[in-house]
Image (cartoon, rainbow, N blue to C red):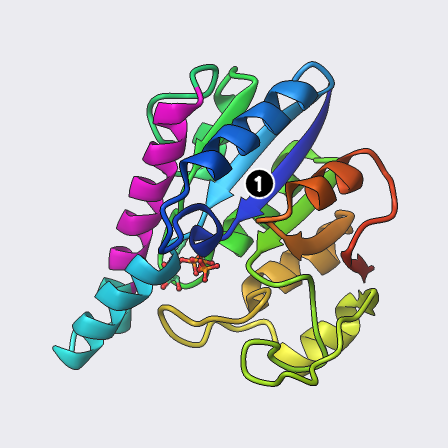
Amino acid sequence: MNSIVISLGGSVLISDEMEKSYFQKLAEFLKQIINEYKVYIIVGGGKTARSYIKLGRNLNFDEKTLDEFGIDITRINARILTSFIRYSNVEIPKTTDEAKKMDKKIVIMGGTTPGHSTDMVGAELAEKINASKFIIATNVDGVYDKDPNKYPDAKQLKQVSIDKLIKEYGTDWGAAGKNIVIDGPALKIIKRSKIPTFVLNGKKLDELKKVVNNENFNGTIIKI
Ligand code: UTP
């Protein structure tokens, strides 16, 4: 059975609106694809993680501690989703090896260790299980030429090469709570493992469906 790894931004799952309908639609979508694919979802930390990290930074905590706050929040976010989706795991795996061993149709987890974001966890898992697709479901419609949350004239890129992204963002982890579309350590793994990678808006479940079904979608294809 083919496997798909989805890195689901914390801010996609847990928004200010706390939408129940998003959970319902996501569960419905997953139900439609689980007979064809094994699905792994890595949930991010979102706004809550960034608030804790900001407070910790103001209190002069070191970067490792700040990353650990972030990881804890990603795991709480993952638990909210596993509690809702009955046919997923209950215990949250702490490593990608643990996730790989789970024999559930849907495996949901958060972060693992300090020094990267959940995108890297997704890329690492996708490499380990030889996933057919790695989908980064974030809070914007793909990769842009500049930050679309800051610049209204930012242009969406339909495709972008991994080398261009690495040139622009590097492969290092900067600081806890860093908010870029794909983090450096994830880029490094995507390049190395050549996993077909797609970036889209996770709120738009129709676009997610299109990527899974190999149809044209509104988002960005990462060219390896
Ligand atoms: P993420 O940065 O993955 O959250 O984790 P996110 O969901 O992508 O953010 P949004 O919602 O899309 O905006 C939050 C923080 O937790 C730490 C990092 O500090 C990261 O910035 N973290 C997370 C780790 O150190 N290791 C991990 O494996 C995961």
> Is the residue 65 above or below the residue 98 in the image?
below
Whether residue 178 sits left or right of residue 50 in the image: it is right
Q: Nearer the viewer, residue 193 or 107?
A: 107
Q: Residue at x 50, y 22 (%)?
A: 101
Residue 156 in the image, given as x and y percentages of width and height: 75, 71
Query: Image quadrant for the C terminus?
Result: bottom right
| Amino acid marked by disc 1 | Leu
Residue 221 in the image, given as x and y percentages of width and height: 80, 57
Q: Residue at x 61, y 85 (%)?
A: 151
Q: Which residues are magenta?
A: 67-85
Q: Quadrant of residue 174?
A: bottom left
Query: Image quadrant for the N terminus?
Result: top right
For the stretch drawn in magenta, the main secondary structure is helix
* Residue at the left extreme of this rendering: 59
Q: Is ligand 1 less than 8 Å from the beta carbon at label 1?
A: no
Q: Is residue 87 magenta?
A: no
Q: Is residue 78 magenta?
A: yes
Q: Residue at x 40, y 32 (%)?
A: 81
Whether residue 48 sits left or right of residue 207 in the image: it is left
Residue 23 in the image, given as x and y percentages of width and height: 46, 34
Residue 206 in the image, given as x and y percentages of width and height: 71, 41
Label 1: how many Cα within 10 Å (few below 14, some 14–19, many 20+): many
**Residue position for label 1:** 125
> Is the residue 122 above or below the residue 169 in the image?
above
- The picture quadrant for ligand 1 comes to bottom left
Whether residue 176 sits left or right of residue 196 in the image: it is left
Q: Secondary structure at mark 1?
A: helix
Q: Nearer the viewer, residue 45 or 201?
A: 201
